[in-house]
Image (cartoon, rainbow, N blue to C red):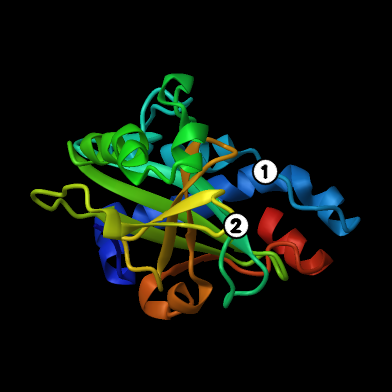
Amino acid sequence: MIVPMTKEEIIDNLKQKTIDNLSIELERRFSHLKHDIMMGRPFQVAKESWEYAFADATEWIGGEWVGSGKNPEDVHISNNKYDIKGLSSRGWKNWSTEASVRQTVKNEYNIDESFIKKDSLSLWESVVHPWIEKVYQSNYHITIFWRNKENNDLRLIMLKVVKENNIEYDKDNFEFSKTQSLMHVKNLCEPNQIKLYVLKCKKRMEMRISGKFFDNPKYHLNIMKNVFANESTLEECFR
């Protein structure tokens, strides 16, 4: 199961020094955006920027970047593995944008045909179960930098993968959309917290988080506040 971590669990896992380091590392990567944000242009950060910031912030405890798609995780710290995501939402109460959990599946699995036939077993075998087998091999965490599009506040959320024995295929755990463009995976997370689904067009598994749930202070850490709200705030953040 994919389970939300509490604020206290996040701090205990990463340590306060890492949390402090994150603000510094993110500031370094955002500073070049100052002019564009002040001009009203969209916030644009490469997904690797979040990974690099996390890796550098955790270097003091052995953090190492291992991304580039070669592993399901992006950063190693001892026997802990971290999959880093950058998500955003319009305000804190809405569902977030999507992020890939399992990268594009090979053509040999013929994802399109599985969707046409509503063959959830085939999608389980080619997409969902291989991901489970990989993340169950270690202490796996999904680490999310969650940005509010309205004011560019930034929060940190973490999810832990809790190992369960005998997770087997059951067709009742999967639901195809009316257009058969995606298949919801319902047995790995609580649907009021996280949406997990296999997407036909991108041939991969994606996730979104619920703003209504994670807006609860129990489940997030405020990392940066009003980063690009106005000139004075920018100067304070980037001095």
Q: How many marks?
A: 2
Q: Amino acid at mark 2?
A: Thr
Mark 2 packing: few (<14 Cα in 10 Å), some, or many (20+)? some
Mark 1 packing: few (<14 Cα in 10 Å), some, or many (20+)? few
The dot on residue 45 is 1
Q: Quick one: SS at disc 2?
A: loop
Q: Which residue is mark 2?
A: 97
* 183 sits to left or right of 9: right
* 171 sits to left or right of 66: left
Q: Residue furthest top?
A: 108
Q: Residue at x 61, y 59 (%)?
A: 88
Residue 63 in view of the camera = no
* Of residues 227 and 142, the one drawn nearer to the viewer in this rendering: 142
**Is the Cβ of the residue at disc 2 closer than 8 Å to that at disc 1?**
no
Q: Residue at x 24, y 57 (%)?
A: 1
Image quadrant holding the C terminus, namely bottom right
Seen in the picture, residue 206 relative to 217 is either above or below; the reply is above
Picture coordinates of residue 70, whole percent (x, y)? 40, 22
Picture coordinates of residue 183, whole percent (x, y)? 45, 51
Q: Residue at x 40, y 51 (%)?
A: 143
Mark 2 or mark 1, whichever is nearer to me: 2
Q: Amino acid at mark 1?
A: Val
Q: Residue furthest front?
A: 117
Picture coordinates of residue 191, whole percent (x, y)? 39, 68
Q: Residue furthest right?
A: 39
* Of residues 133 and 87, the one drawn nearer to the viewer in this rendering: 133
